Amino acid sequence: MSSQRAEPTKMKHKPQPWWSNPRARQRLIPFALIAPAFLVVFALAAYSFVWLVYLSTQDLTFGQPVHEGRPVGLANYIWLLTNSGSIFWISVRTTAIHVLGTTLPELLLGFAIALLLNRQMRGGSLLTAVLIIPIVLMPSMVGLVARLYFTYDGLVNFFVETFTGSRFNWSGPERALTSVILVDIWEWTPFFILILLAGLQTLPREPYEAALVDGASRWQSFRFITLPMMFPLILTALVLRLMDVLRIFDVIYVMFGGGPGSATTTLPLLTYRTTLVQEYVGRGSAVSIMLIIIIVTLTYLLIQLRARVTHQP
Amino acid sequence: MLKKMWMLGLMVLLLAGLSHTALAQDEEWAAGVRAANEGTELIIAVASHPSVEAFKPMIRDFEEMTGITVRLDEMEEGQLGQKLTLEVANNVTSYDAVMAAVERSPKLADAAYSEPLEPWINDSMKTPDWFDYEDILSAYRDLFLWEGQHWAIPFAGESVFLFYRSDLFEEHGISVPTTYDELLEAACYFHNEVDGISGVSFRARLGWEFTYTWSIFLFPFGGQMVDPMTGTPALDVPGTADSLNYMKALAECAPVGVESYSFPEAWDAFALGNAAIMVEATAAAPEMENPEKSLVAGNIGYAQLPTGPAGSFTGVWGWGIAMTAASENKDATWALMTYLTGRGTQDQYLAGGGIPSRASSLGDEELQMANPYYGATLDSLAQAGNLFAAGHSVVIPIPEWGQFSEIMGNDGARAFIGEISVEEAITNMQAAAEELLGSAE
Amino acid sequence: MKANLSGLRLLRTLIQRGWDALTVAIVAAFLFPYAFMVLSAFKPRLETFKFANWILKPSLWFTKLQLDNFEQILDRFDLNILFYMKNSLIIAVASTLLTMIIAIPATYSFARFDFRRKEAIAYGFLFLQMVPGISIVFALYFIAQQLKLHDTHAFLIFVYLLWNIPYAIWMLRGFVSAIPQDLEEAAMVDGASRFTAFRLVTLPLMVGGLAATSILIFIGVWNEFSLAFFLTSLNSRTLPTSIAFFQTHSGIKWGTMFATATLGTLPVVIFALIVRRYFVSALTFGAVKG
């Protein structure tokens, strides 16, 4: 390949197609390098997405051959959004609570612990290494273990009872979602800790020294120096986490399967239950489409917000 | 070689404890199967089930006897259902035989995924005498009857009965409940009066688990799934709401968290001594009597389900093995099916913890002595007969049953925890069921 | 005056130690559920369920350690967990390698060239990988059937590329950008082709980043559940989906489940600790340097 390119001059007298023009080729190189990645990712995503859109306009039972589907236009979407038997809006609400209930506590807790870890102390790097563990565990196993820990006689209630004297029904309709959220907080607070700690460690020292000279209190230097400088990073962490939380399936599936009632039926669970359990392929695909729209829109908005804050793309 | 065969035959004889007459045919049969099928590989999809645990050593014997290799693809039963539906949807078959729940059988048959078995059962060349199809209780055989043919050989029959802690009942002077009011009363007595004990354990997790338990309570209160005459959805009769309300009342005296219980949790609650009563599958009984897994083994009484305002009913479920229509190794598959489910190998099967389905084993006096739940199992079969006589069944034999069951399980579970009212749930269900099966008008 | 100062210093040291203790306690709390799980793998079944008993009697923690659960999951005729680990390993290694082969040129292009709509294309990759696996599993199943690739390692290896390639591009881009372009240009002035310059100059400098990215992709594939669950069966079932075996008619087999979880998570925990220096940038698609 390199030898060919080294001697293009040899054939100069012959009529040239445009692609052997070195400058045109030069312009094509970056695209040629991207092409395989683009083709694979785009082919898979586009094919699946077109399929999904098509299925969402069909009346089709899971188990029926796909060509037996009956086109129904937007009826599936209308059913989901308006029918009294549909739990779509309940699921949206559950998803919203799930997203807010995980990301915000994780952020606050993560920030606080990152500040703690940011002090000079012996063995600090060992502690941060330990925090990696929850993040890399197999979620399906985490879910199954959590199912045991959160039973009435389980580990969680053992500690709750030790400290409060009473036990809770962690798998009941009022608290099942909380259990799922607590598991997520355990798994993913370290994510915020590690990112924010990395950010804190790269902050410049000068502004703090200047503030100290001006007689600023600790709180003031945190509020007016640390926080603004960390803000873009916080947004980055939130975007990434949001993308993931909206897709969580395995932990909830293993712990509660969406129940009791519809207490833990977030949108990914609703997709699964509608398509593969209740066997309404069309409605399930419509849920999928709406979920994808929600994920992409929210992420896009947060990326835009981040760009506005940092004045860069 | 001959000597080796003889030894093998003898070993099988000792292991399986075959009757004398079966001996000669058994060896002959094994040799015949080996001659025709040696080297074949069979792939069987199975659910996680005590009977499958019992099959595993039997399969190893079968492999040695016949030279056929068998690979089991084992999964949780809900997942098995979804996997088979995916296969049906895409018109592919990766298995030679599948373990079919009665719930899924019509769907598999309707899609021509499974093979009708009459030609095989009636073929005396391929079916050894010790298989004895007629010995399987007809209540179980006919679970797999659809459009006039049988589509699977049942090996594990199940119904639901009462498990109760005989030691606690005696200590507190409570008699075994015979009506549903008494059941509620007894459950709540233990729940409220005895420390560290809850009243009654059952499964009520969102989905098919909820439907399973509900279908037990549904009919004694006069509820219905479909109209017995027309086959159209008839969930909106008053009895349906009554049964749901009864379940809600019973949940007040159930272990905390019962709304998330699948059968493992329900069984554990009873096995660990946390519940005084359990309304569960007869298939749980061997586990409950196993001292390695249960703290209450030996202290359990069994009784048929109580009587409700509309009568005394329970249901029958069952697991069978179905041959796939697309299998390329049907002779070998049939040999395996007869070996696993035949009368000749029943003793080994039962000793390994398999759930019985045959008259010869359930009616055997020695076995009845050794297994205190055999009697109650037969009683509950009679009770299940009542339901059949009334024109109902806990599983409607239609290909759409999976969806119907989820329709009931979804809204039923929501009403059970008070997320929506019982009336609202039944309205939703009836509408969804009519959309699925059509309405009476 | 002097005594006063040292008293103050003592107080300050005490407060510092107090914060240290709190930090250690918090981190220990994050470790505890995992540690408890690993310990539970060595207990018989009934004991695992009776927690209170278990914690209150620390003597039970180590005196009755037993390996039964591990023997059972490794038994070829029983749970045969090694088979599922082997599948997971094949799929994770192959998918990671393939991802790298496809993603490295693309990354190089993003980091070293300027072209129209570069950022738009880069974000395009990011958005495409946002699709939830569970949403398209039905479509993927259909493709698998059409291509006769159902229940093969190859299909999962291929499918995971949809999520892995964008991730690798975003991760690696940071590593490549951090290597000064001058070095490559100097090599090219000396007569090396672009490819040779990349191979001899840039590639060796990004080995650390490549290793970190590969390991993180490996972990992601190793842990993936929802796609593997529906797209595999007998021949290629992976470890995370083996949870199905533990929810049985004989109750959930907690002992064997704990043993499997222990065996299945130890490799990734070790891997993650090896690349912990890169871990933060790995978590953030390279948006934050660790």
Image: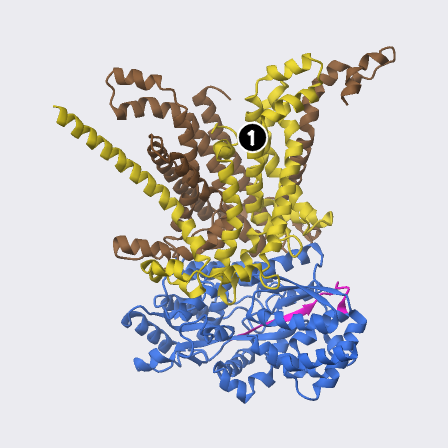
Q: Residue furthest top?
A: A13
What colour scheme has been applied to the protein in the rendered image? by chain
Which lettered chain is shown in blue? B
Q: Nearer the viewer, residue C118 or C252?
A: C252
Picture coordinates of residue B30, whole percent (x, y): 75, 77
Image point (73%, 78%), residue name: B121
Q: Nearer the viewer, residue B52 or A242?
A: B52
Image point (62%, 20%), residue name: C112
Picture coordinates of residue B56, whole percent (x, y): 62, 69
Colour seen for chain A: brown
Residue A242 against residue B50 in the figure, above or below: above
Image point (41%, 27%), residue name: A199
Picture coordinates of residue C277, whole percent (x, y): 48, 32
Q: Nearer the viewer, residue B383 or B119?
A: B119
Which lettered chain is shown in yellow? C
Q: Look at the numbered disc 1 and give the secondary structure of its residue.
A: helix
Amino acid residing under circle 1 = Gly
Q: Is residue B151 left or right of residue B246?
A: right
Residue C275 against residue C139 in the figure, above or below: above
- The local crowd at label 1, few if under 14, some if 14 to 19, many if 20 or more residues have their Cα within 10 Å, is some
Quarter of the image that includes the N terminus of chain A? top right
Magenta-drawn segment = B315-330
Residue for badge 1? C208
